[in-house]
Image (spheres, rainbow, N blue to C red):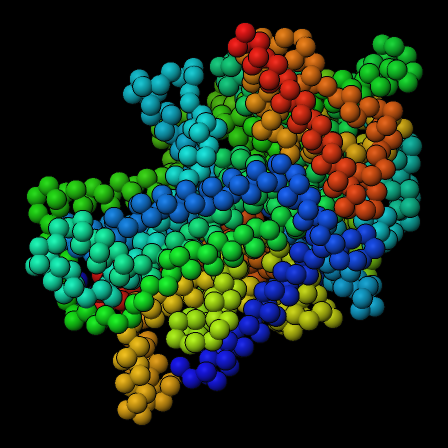
Amino acid sequence: MNLLNRLAVIGLLLALLVGLPLAFRRVAGDRMTVDADDRLVMISPHNETIRREFARAFGDWWRAKTGRSLYVDWRTPGGASEIRMVLDAGFKAAAETGREGIGIDVFFGGGEPDFASQAKLGRLARAAVFDRHPEWFGERAAVPPELTGERLWAADGSWVGCCLSQFGIAYNPGVLQRLGAGEPRSWEDLGDPRLMGTVALADPTKSGSVARAFELLVQSDMQRAIREQGDTPGARSAGWADGLRTILRMAANARYFTDSASKVPHDIGQGDAAAGMCIDFYGRAYAEKWRRADGSSRVGWIAPEGGGSFSADPVAVLKGAPHPELAQAFVEFCLSPEGQVLWFFKPGEAGGPKERALHRTPIRRDVYTAENLRRSTLPEVDPFARVEGGFFYRKELTGKAFNTLRQLVKVACIDSHDELTRAWRAVAAAGFPPEATAVLLDVSAVPYEAFGQGDALLDGGDPLAAAARARELGERFRANFRRAAAMVERTAER
Amino acid sequence: MKRGTARGIALAAVALFGVFFLYPAWTVLRQAFVGNGGAFTLEALGMVFGTPIYREGLANAFGLGLASTAAALGLAFPLALIAHRHEFPGKSWLGALVLAPMVLPPFVGAVGVKQMLGVEGAFNALLVQLGWMDAAAPFDWLAHGRFGGMVAMNALHLYPILYLNIMAALSNLDSAMEQAAENLGCPPWRRFWRITLPLAMPGVFAGASIVFIWAFTELGVPLVFDYGRVAPVQIFDGIKGLDKNPIPYALAAVLMAAAAGTFALSKLALGRARLGTAPRPQGGSAAKPARGWKAFACAAAFGSVAGLACLPHLGVIVLSVADNWAGTVLPEHLTLRHFTEALGNGLVVPSIQNSLLYATGATVLALTAGLGVAWVVVRSDLKWRGWLDTLAMLPLAVPGLVMAFGYLAQSQEGKPFHFLVGAGGSPFGLLVIAYAIRRLPYLVRAAAAGLQQANPVLEEAARSLGATPFRMLRRIALPLIGTHLAAGCILAFAFAMMEVSDSLILAQQAQHYPITKAIYALLSTLGNGTEMAAALGVWAMAFLGVAIAGAAALAGRRGGWFRL
């Protein structure tokens, strides 16, 4: 083929390739309307589906209210840690140049800890919805201040939850059956040695919500000990140690710790992992994705027995927002009944999402009516229907250890994962001899008495001192793991 | 080269690096060197070396770098030699297929690997179907023998870099030298060791140094294998952590220093061959037709390496048309829905335009700067040209997130790089520079290898006959090293199109997204997000593949790997 012919073929192929998205865009009618009358700038870790449905619904709501078109300018640098870095860089530069804002109106989505830390830095403006609709907030109102012990909105009005989320366990029934394990019911079940190398865990160092899930796990064991022994220092201490040991067992089975919310249910669906820690709506979305004709699914999701609370997924207006009225209107929309049903209505239902279900639980209790539940993808779910004896978060037990706990998971489980899994395998192969198992799961280096209210060095303001402390604790855990492995290996040699 | 000119070019290059590489990198990495009171400290650095897990992470990264480079060389050199010496059926197609790993899209590339090699992936399903594996006890390929697996995957992903550089070097060899050795009775192996390999060393060094630093600092492959005890993953995890831990920044500084040191040492040992005195090849190809089993063996060698390297691509392609796919060799139901939804998404068309603009701009900038640096390094006698060469390799060793956050912080309003943010917040200037700086090593190495092979006497003759420096460059030097430059440009363009960190962080508004960020956005769609991302990934692979073929057809009518 001569050069000209070759170039002609290549040119034709390129034209065809470029033409395809143009043609499909024309059919789908999906164009960015950047030159709308109004523009709202939002930074968000929410997935594309939530962003799309909310942009469309709020755009319609805004047009109906004002007659003006709207373009939502989404800023999506990644997850919680990337957003924090973007906000840090923006506000640092703003402070240096005497500006109040960073060109972003709204921070939409994430965990309560992420918003609480931004509020503490003074970067969030008071949400006007508290003044415009005071009737929505209160003990007996649509949005109570707390649910299962978790704050649903900030007392100073700097942020407000707009839906709820709950960490639970996603699992693949087929893989569990192959491994000879039953379907998990509690966090402890993820420490079953039959699941060795097949558990997918979320990384608490990169997400406040995941860190909270680990805290709840520890607290669940503490509350059990308190129920059994009474609320004594000994019971708290024993429960704390039990919780840490549960985490060690889960981590010993872990394939990885990830900061990607969708990776866990994806890998479980694919059969690469048997079970894992997963936020509710991803669990439900993947269960639906893998649903078979007979109603069964490759992916199941459960809320762990006694170890989960509902936490708020907030929204907030940033200080110095370039479009403050629009930003406040968005928060109001999110909390309005129209915004609320978007979270859980089936696609195509009037007032529901247009393309895909969001599988999320609204934060207003008054939208959980029989009629709405019938039109939703979550007919069985009502977080406000309190189950007697259900889990209730007690901040005084572990609240101050929130950061310490996630650092402990990092040093003992993530940084030391090689040593931990090696020892776990060796101890399991030896049939869990009590002495070696006790050494492997020894958490006496981090007792509740010293760490339960937070460790001064790990939580302190000196990063170098915190790093040195983390190294010291990590070395102690790794020494335990190596010693446990050596104990069973010595026994085997004898 | 006149010393004044060399000094001018070198200073301009150092200024470029100083402003757009060292400064933003330092603004982020300085966290490792600042104590609580703001004073300079090496405590974090001491902690890196004093903590066994970080030492192990560095050692593992170094081991991965060395082993992956050796394995990639083991794949690329024989293939390049076969292509250089033999004509065989399907050579043009197989030669093009060799470059396929360069067009693997991010995010979904890892998904593609898992679709094929996962516990319930297609490969295990095939083995079960053939009765070679017990369905109740499938083998976990990605969890067992991870080091070997990572080396294999690195090698299969990176060997095109070596292949392109070696082919460019071989295409500049005068086949008369090999023929003379043959006529004098030199056996093939001796001929290879004494003639071919020494003359091709600039290309080998150029490719191997890039592959080594790439594999040494590689993040994606260890993440696919869930392997955390390796320095790049420790850095990535640390930087993304919500605390203000200085260790990952200290570790990144150590990684950069180690990469630079290894490069400088290997250059001392390997890169100082006195070349450039050989005559230019007198046209014509050195390749002779292979017949019978030899022709089959040549094709089989290319086919098997390219086939293995394309496994992730195959995973992505099948996934893009799969309804739901797990536990079977092929999906039970096929659909084009993901393509129509993905390509019809409003993000896609602008992202294609943006990526083309950003990648083209970056390639032109990298070509200009890279040629200047290489010229000083190879043709001048400046004492510090070795430092300049090492400096030019550093962008390969810096974690993407470090550079991205460095640029982000410095491009805020009132900060030094804010002038790079265009009207309406366009990140064009930022991304072109960020992409170009990170892709500069490809151009520097490619141009340096070309200049090492080109006979400077020809340039000197042109100058003595009165040619201006520009005319000499245009009429003599560029044609002599054109093949190398084209190879470097193609690598730079392809990798800029598939860039991740800068794209995710710096392209903030949807109308400015490059393709990689559009893929990332689609990936997070509930339901069929992975499949939609795979569909756009397939489109990107096809487009980049055809674009590279087009560039090759335009640029490379003469010799080398371009004879597709």
Residues A63 and B398: in front is B398
Query: Which percent across, then down, holds residue A214?
Result: 73, 28
Query: Which percent across, then down, holds residue B343?
Result: 46, 51
Residue A461 shows in this picture: yes
Residue at 62% over, 48% down: B251
Residue A182 shows in this picture: no
Q: Which residue lies furthest to the bottom in this view?
A: B466
Query: Which percent across, then down, holds residue B379?
Result: 39, 75
Residue at 53% over, 60% down: B395
Asked which quadrant contains residue A389, the reply is top right
Residues A24 and B110: in front is B110
Q: How many labels does the image show?
A: 0
For the N terminus of chain A, which image quadrant?
A: bottom left
For the C terminus of chain A, which image quadrant?
A: top right
Asked if A241 appears above or below B546 in the picture, the reply is above
Query: Which percent across, then down, holds residue B71?
Result: 36, 43
Residues B155 and B38: in front is B38
Residue at 51% over, 14% down: A179
Residue at 80% over, 55% down: A318
Asked if A348 appears above or below A269 in the picture, the reply is below
Taking the image as shown, residue B484 lies to the left or right of residue A244, namely: left
